[in-house]
Amino acid sequence: MSWKVGIVTVSDRCANGDREDSSGQLLIRLCQNWQVTEYKVIPDEQQQIEQTLIQLADQAGCDLILTTGGTGFAVRDVTPEATRAVIHREAPGLCEAMRAATASQTKFAILSRAVAGIRNQTLIVNLPGSPKGVEECFAAIADVLPHALEVLTKNVSHS
């Protein structure tokens, strides 16, 4: 199945043009088997993150939205708060799996505040802002995403 994917990079520096968005570009490559229909680079502003997630889920019809950035402890890291504000149900197992898989690579993985959840029939997953973190976290959940999206979008049972 070709899922419609939205990629959102949340970074003040990338949005200002001060840094290249290598994490978002990496996510686009990692999702090459699906259809990346939306790609946005926005600053660490909670209201703008919320509006972008809503727009991609409700108007653009993305089945999956992957965010990169804004999941740490810095004051401006508000991606998890924005995600929680727009989802209807959390999917904590995805982030638990990402943290567990990456904790063996770096002890700092447990500091991730990433959130995953469902808005209507769209799955939203927060990933870290570094390319290494994106690659490792995506690898931890990539195998279950097709089934999750199939169940979510087609109302298929888990059995």
Image (tube, helix red, strand yellow):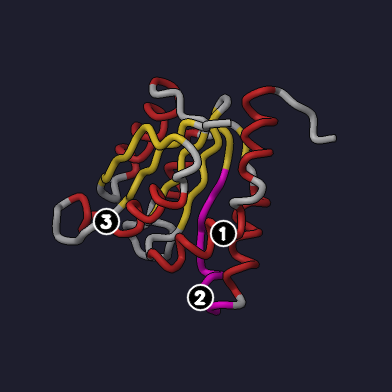
Q: Which structural element holds mark 1?
A: helix
Q: What residue do we see at 22% from left, 55% from top?
A: 14
- Asked if the magenta segment contains residue 115, the reply would be yes
Q: Say what amino acid the circle numbered 3 marks.
A: Asp
Q: Which residues are magenta?
A: 105-116
Q: Is residue 118 above or below residue 22?
A: above
Q: Nearer the viewer, residue 134 or 115?
A: 134
Q: Is residue 84 above or below residue 54?
A: below
Q: Say what amino acid the circle numbered 1 marks.
A: Ala
- Asked if the magenta segment contains residue 69, the reply would be no
Badge 3 or badge 1: first in the primary sequence: 3
Q: Give the image location of residue 107, x and y in percent.
A: 55, 79
Disc number placed over residue 116 in the picture, else none: none
Badge 2 or badge 3: first in the primary sequence: 3
Q: Which structural element holds mark 3?
A: loop
Q: What residue do we see at 15% from left, 52% from top?
A: 16
Q: Nearer the viewer, residue 10 or 19?
A: 19
Task: Please state, as top left, top right, bottom left or bottom right, where the N terminus lies in the image.
Answer: top right
Q: Tell me the residue that label 1 is attached to.
A: 139
- Of labels 2 and 3, the one closer to you: 3
Q: Give the image location of residue 158, x and y in percent.
A: 80, 35
Q: What residue do we see at 71% from left, 23% from top?
A: 155
